[in-house]
Image (cartoon, helix red, strand yellow):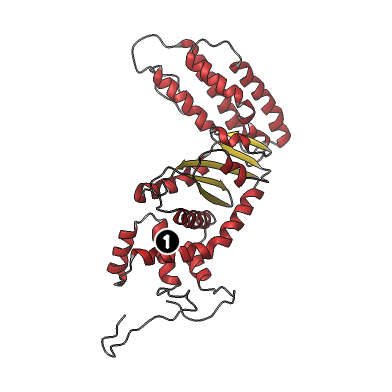
């Protein structure tokens, strides 16, 4: 700022700055944090001016964002290595436009963090390359490209299965029900209930519910007990799916479940594997939030910056750490790796 008394430009001291850069670690970490909260560049500019009387251009904001991404690149690559070594990973994907063209934002998340990847395709190459060397259990929905991932096992999201049942119930004029419900079917229109369809739907739900409730009991059953019960439940499900169903929805859903029969009860065979994909679906919503605000990114360079920062941001939240504090500390370390103990802007 300009001092009113001496009429000189007063600047905060910083440990170091990249060439031709005006703002330091405090400003950069604050700006990037606002970006991760979902604020547009225009709102960030307005907030900077109203709060600190700082006028900053869009180009400068993007430059600071790139500085942050370059600083966090090593953390991003380290996170990828940790995801590969995890015992269980959940994955999901959503549309994300780059330069106005359709692309995809993928997330691979576990208890240790969330790793995001933006790609021009929704095909198998992304999960196949990202999870190369992964030996844990992959939690996923029914999207076929996940089938190529070689690992200890796949767990199909049981809530995804229930959505198939819910859509079929609506089609038959039945009030849709949750997976773990004990409610009887309730007709939303006059007429006789579709008995064979209800026999199928209630049968699938009851078997899945039995498996979930068994693994969630307290104290938890031993792995040996779980393996025995899992075989019985798999046998019951196979018998149900192999029946000669006449309802077209029961035929279609039973066909899908037969193809993925080995993915339905993996959570019973491995400790710590969730039976749902909620973690990945929560993580992918962050990408949906940014997509709604900005429509995506203008360039692939911007997309690469976004995937790095979002990965580290979501991971610090998951680990209970402060994103801004961690980021500011990293930005204060110059490229030579020697931390300087001086005041910062």
Instruction: Tell which residue pokes out farthest to the right in this image.
Output: 224
CA neighbours of label 1 inside 10 A, class few (<14), some (14 to 19), many (20+):
some
Left or right, residue 58 beside residue 322: left
Q: Tell which of 344 and 18 is nearer to you.
A: 18
- Relative to the observer, which residue lies in front, 342 or 224? 342
- Total marks shown come to 1
Task: Tell me where residue 214 sits by quadrant.
Answer: top right
71 vs 144: above or below? below
Q: Outermost residue, left direction?
A: 4
**Residue under the point 56% across and 23% down:** 256
Q: Position of residue 258 (x, y in %)?
A: 60, 22
Name the residue nearer the viewer: 295 or 137.
295
- Which residue is at 51% across, 10% downward? 246
Q: Name the residue under label 1.
A: 33
Q: In the picture provided, is 26 more to the left or to the right than 199?
A: left
Quarter the N terminus occupies: bottom left
Residue 303 seen from this side: yes
Q: Where is residue 255 in the image (x, y as percent from the top left)?
A: 56, 20
**297 w.r.t. 16: above or below:** above
Q: Quadrant of the C terminus?
A: bottom left
Q: In this view, does 155 lie to the left or right of 167?
A: right
Residue 94 x %, y %: 46, 41
Apparent side of residue 39 relative to residue 241 in the rendered image (left or right): left
Residue 192 in the image: x percent, y percent? 39, 9
Q: Which residue occupies 43% across, 24% down?
A: 167
Nearer to me, 112 or 77? 77
Q: Is mark 1 on a helix, strand or loop?
A: helix
User: Is residue 275 at least partly visible in the picture?
Assistant: no
């Amino acid at each position: 700022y300009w001092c009113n008394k001496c009429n000189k430009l007063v600047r905060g001291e910083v440990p170091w700055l990249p060439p031709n850069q005006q703002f330091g670690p405090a400003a950069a970490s604050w700006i990037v944090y606002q970006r991760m909260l979902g604020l547009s560049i225009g709102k960030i500019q307005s907030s900077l001016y109203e709060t600190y009387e700082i006028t900053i251009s869009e180009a400068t904001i993007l430059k600071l964002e790139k500085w942050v991404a370059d600083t966090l690149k090593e953390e991003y690559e380290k996170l990828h290595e940790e995801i590969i070594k995890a015992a269980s990973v959940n994955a999901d994907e959503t549309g994300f436009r780059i330069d106005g063209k359709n692309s995809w934002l993928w997330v691979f998340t576990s208890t240790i963090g969330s790793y995001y990847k933006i790609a021009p395709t929704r095909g198998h190459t992304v999960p196949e390359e990202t999870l190369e060397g992964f030996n844990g259990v992959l939690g996923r929905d029914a999207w076929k490209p996940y089938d190529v991932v070689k690992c200890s096992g796949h767990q199909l999201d049981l809530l995804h299965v229930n959505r198939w049942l819910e859509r079929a119930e609506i089609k038959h004029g039945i009030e849709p029900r949750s997976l773990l419900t004990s409610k009887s079917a309730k007709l939303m229109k006059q007429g006789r209930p579709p008995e064979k369809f209800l026999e199928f739907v209630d049968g699938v739900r009851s078997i899945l519910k039995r498996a979930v409730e068994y693994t969630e009991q307290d104290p938890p059953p031993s792995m040996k007990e779980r393996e025995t019960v899992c075989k019985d439940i798999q046998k019951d499900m196979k018998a149900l799916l192999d029946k000669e169903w006449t309802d077209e929805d029961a035929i279609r859903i039973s066909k899908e479940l037969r193809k993925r029969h080995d993915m339905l009860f993996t959570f019973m065979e491995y400790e710590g594997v969730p039976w749902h994909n909620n973690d990945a679906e929560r993580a992918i919503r962050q990408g949906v939030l940014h997509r709604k605000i900005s429509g995506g990114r203008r360039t692939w360079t911007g997309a690469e910056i976004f995937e790095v920062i979002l990965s580290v941001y979501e991971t610090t939240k998951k680990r209970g750490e402060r994103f801004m504090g961690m980021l500011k500390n990293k930005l204060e370390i110059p490229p030579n790796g020697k931390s300087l103990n001086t005041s910062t802007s």
